[in-house]
Image: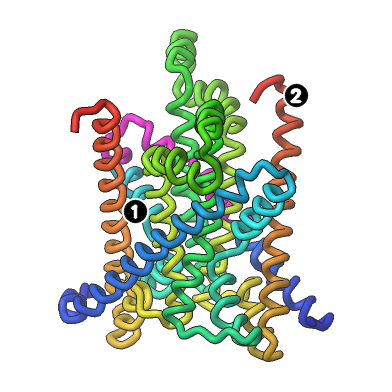
């Protein structure tokens, strides 16, 4: 069995996992929106860049991507400490997936709406914030939450650059106590709890939104 | 900064070996977990609600565990329960165990989308259990789910990079070896990420071809 000190240690690791994930999600969602805007925009070079970025980042394992950012980028003169490198890597990764979600929502909008907005004299900017965004953030919410759960599940990748998250903490405890199973199983339960809470919170929010707006 | 192409060319065999290991490990795991996932369909679609609930809970729990944590559990945790695996067996076992939960869920969702009358008709003709699965349900699912299974294979390949942590010589491990020996971190990891990109693009291309082939089959041309 785990003693209290080890359990507190695990909770501390869980705190790191949550902090890094929240920071990555909070910056990855707007970044993804920017990517989607670039991909559906009018400038061809920007469209190409955003498409290539999205395709590349979504195909690369997060572990390898974290290593590229932390070990590789200093060769180009961009150096990070482990913690900011972890946040940057996870944010850049989740942004690519969020970008796809935003793009699908934008493409799914009825085209007539934008034409109507233009006919009313709205600039593209106003049309985006008044017509497009209020609709797509609600329809994208379930997919965005799904991507958040995926991000939490790949977040142990940051352990390879020495950030002591929940998984690495469990490994350390198991190496000290010579009893790996309690530490790993407790960590698995904590991950399960985080995901269940996240999904339950999202369901609650969706229900409130449906009640308030009458539709999703 | 100079881009050390010479190191990459010289160490090309090591990258190729890593890529090869990544491909065969993920390919074999995918085939095995497709079979295990199909077996899991029996309890998941059982007519007894309790059997169904327990099976679904097991699948959901499996999908909650991060891949690296599962790797640790299998490689460092199981020995204390008396099961000692070498790193290759541990890697394969982790990949299969992890992926089976996802494959079972994918197959179940696909099964749920089949018209219910079809299964009822098959049952009326005396098909049940495994025979029903093998003759009626699975052939349709594998064709209908081709793209989803392709995406899951890409997911599996990306998760397999975690195996470098238990020093399994797959692609990310190879890149790490090269970078630490020659100190060329940027070149080495860039090459590895580009190889992953190419691999995933190849899988997507294969899926699209299979889809086209399947739709021709359905129209009865090929």
Boundaries of the magenta span: A22-47
The residue where tag 2 is placed is A212
Label 2 marks a residue whose chain is A
Q: Look at mark 1 in the image and give the residue it sits on.
A: A56
Q: Quadrant of residue A139?
A: top right
Q: Residues within 10 Å of mark 2 (few under 14, many from 20)?
A: few
Q: Is residue A107 shown left or right of residue A20?
A: left
Residue B98 percent coordinates (x, y): 53, 63
The answer to whether the residue labelled 1 contacts the one labelled 2, judged by CB atoms less than 8 Å apart, is no
Q: What residue do we see at 58% from left, 64% from top?
A: B66
Which residue is rendered at x = 50% and y = 45% of the image?
B107
- Counting from the top left corner in percent of width and height, residue B174 is at 32, 78
**Quarter assignment of residue A14:** bottom right
Q: Is residue A79 visible?
A: no
Q: Main secondary structure of the magenta part?
A: helix
In the displayed image of the protein, which residue is found farthest to the right?
A: A4
Q: CA distance from mark 1 to mark 2?
A: 39 Å
Q: Is residue B59 above or below residue B168?
A: above
Q: Chain of mark 1?
A: A
Looking at the image, is mark 1 or mark 2 earlier in the sequence?
A: 1
The local secondary structure at tag 2 comes to helix
Residue A105 seen in the figure: yes
């Amino acid at each position: 069995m785990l003693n209290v000190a080890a359990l507190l240690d695990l909770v501390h690791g869980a705190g790191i996992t949550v902090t890094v994930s929240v920071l990555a999600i909070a910056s990855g969602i707007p970044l993804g929106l920017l990517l989607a805007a670039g991909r559906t925009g009018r400038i061809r070079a920007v469209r190409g860049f955003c498409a290539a970025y999205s395709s590349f980042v979504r195909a690369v394992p997060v572990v390898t991507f974290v290593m590229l950012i932390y070990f590789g980028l200093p060769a180009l003169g961009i150096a990070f400490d482990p913690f900011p490198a972890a946040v940057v890597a996870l944010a850049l990764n989740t942004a690519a997936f969020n970008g796809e979600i935003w793009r699908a929502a934008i493409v799914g909008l009825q085209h007539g709406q934008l034409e109507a907005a233009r006919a009313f004299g709205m600039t593209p900017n106003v049309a985006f914030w008044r017509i497009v965004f209020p609709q797509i953030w609600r329809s994208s919410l379930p997919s965005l939450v799904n991507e958040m759960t995926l991000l939490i599940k790949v977040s142990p990748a940051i352990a390879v650059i020495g950030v002591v998250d929940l998984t690495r903490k469990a490994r350390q405890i198991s190496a000290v106590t010579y009893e790996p199973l309690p530490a790993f199983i407790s960590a698995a339960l904590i991950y399960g709890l985080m995901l269940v809470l996240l999904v339950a919170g999202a369901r609650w929010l969706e229900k409130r939104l449906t009640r308030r707006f009458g539709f999703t | 900064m100079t881009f050390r192409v010479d190191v990459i060319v010289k160490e090309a065999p090591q990258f190729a070996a890593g890529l090869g290991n990544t491909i065969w490990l993920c390919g074999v795991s995918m085939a095995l977990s497709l079979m295990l996932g199909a077996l899991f369909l029996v309890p998941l679609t059982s007519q007894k609600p309790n059997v169904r609930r327990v099976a679904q809970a097991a699948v959901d729990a499996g999908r909650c565990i991060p891949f690296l944590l599962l790797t640790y559990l299998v490689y460092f945790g199981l020995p204390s329960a008396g099961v000692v695996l070498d790193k290759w067996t541990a890697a394969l076992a982790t990949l299969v165990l992890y992926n089976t939960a996802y494959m079972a869920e994918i197959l179940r969702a696909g099964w749920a989308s089949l018209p219910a009358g079809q299964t009822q008709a098959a049952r009326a003709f005396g098909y049940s259990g495994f025979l029903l699965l093998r003759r009626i349900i699975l052939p349709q699912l594998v064709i209908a789910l081709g793209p989803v299974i392709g995406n899951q294979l890409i997911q599996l390949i990306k998760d397999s990079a975690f195996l470098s942590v238990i020093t399994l010589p797959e692609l990310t491990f190879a890149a790490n070896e090269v970078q630490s020996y020659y100190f060329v971190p940027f070149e080495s990891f860039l090459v590895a990420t580009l190889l992953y990109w190419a691999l995933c693009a190849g899988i997507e291309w294969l899926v699209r071809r299979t889809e086209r082939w399947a739709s021709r089959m359905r129209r009865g041309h090929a």
